[in-house]
Amino acid sequence: MLQNILSQLHKPDQAILFTTHWSPDGDAIGSSVGLALYLRSKGLTVHVVLPNEPSIALKKSPSCDADFVHVHESEPEKVAALIKACDVHCALDYNVPHRTGKALSPLLAAMDAFEILIDHHQEPDGRYDICYSDTGKGSTAEMVADLIEADGGLGQISQACAENLLMGLITDSGSFRYPSTSSHTLRLAAALMDQGAHPEAIHRRLFESSNISRLQLIGRGLSSITFHANQRAALLTLSLDDMKACGYQSGDTDGLVNWGLSVEGVSVSCLFREDSAGVVKCSFRSVGDINVNRFARAYFQGGGHANAAGGIYQGTLQSAMDRFVEHVNDLFV
Ligand SMILES: [Mn+2]
């Protein structure tokens, strides 16, 4: 599988395009920019397309502002030209085209290129010519590091590439806390440190660069918490009024959902955030055998991993909460 991908990518004189999911996180950016930096160092033509602007913290990650990284929302014409010229398309850190958002996904679905998927989410789409899907991996960045290792070793990558990959590992492993963290993950992290990546600097950039709006939204989110299913599930909510009052900026509520799990006895935590009038964004986190992927698919038009999933609800925040309360016990059967 890895050699098959490498031989496709290393073909001469072709345009390679990477895309990743809507609201790109540290793994989406780390895996796509990291692999792009590596392949570009080999003289290949690689561009990265993000559907929309990343958070301010992520924008400060190495090479996120490089001239080969494009945001579809801000540069639609440039991105349309890149899609048209593309010979090989790599989908990183998402499993189905619609995860790239309403504007970009139809362009990707219609493109005529060799298609490669590199991803760790469950149930990948069948459209890819090569489907490198491994739900046992904690991050897509880990899969990219394995790919580079198979191509001659991580010992040859730049510091910026190493920082991007380590950012992906740190983001999706909850700083090496989640069960998907293996001894292999830690060995890769060590190899990336040997190339000059600093976990402490990445951590500071990602998690300790709060702005006032983020702190205020965390405060409101934590105050909203309610418990359900005999105190086994926590629900946090943020209304559109909360978002406006605090001056919401993209990324402000990242990680907020995890706080529910810090309460003893709670094994599911959910955040419902009113994104616009009549649209509620849902995040689900769980520990152990509780499968929030199934729950998000069944009731909130979403999905993801067994222990981390997202979804959406069309309606008022109150009706989303009612739906949650109605079905929450399904999580524990
Ligand atoms: Mn990921």
Image (cartoon, helix red, strand yellow):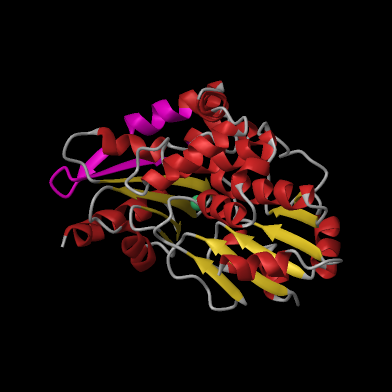
Residue at 66% of width from left, 34% of height from top?
61
Left or right, 157 with respect to 304, comes to right
| Residue 265 or residue 282, whichever sits in front | 265
Q: Is residue 231 magenta?
A: yes
Residue at x-position 55% and y-position 68%: 96
Q: Quadrant of residue 212?
A: top right
Q: Position of residue 293 (x, y in %)?
A: 36, 61
Residue in front for this viewpoint, 112 or 12:
12
Position of 80 relative to 216 (above/below) = below
Q: Quadrant of residue 45?
A: bottom right
From the top left corner, tell me how far across and down residue 71 is, in percent: 74, 49
- Residues rendered magenta in the picture: 217-241
State the image quarter where residue 239 is shown. Answer: top left
Side of 329 where 218 appears, left or right: right
Q: Is residue 103 left or right of residue 276?
A: right
**Up-down relation of residue 135 to residue 152 (above or below):** below
Q: Nearer the viewer, residue 289 or 22?
A: 289
In the shown orientation, is residue 290 left or right of residue 202? left
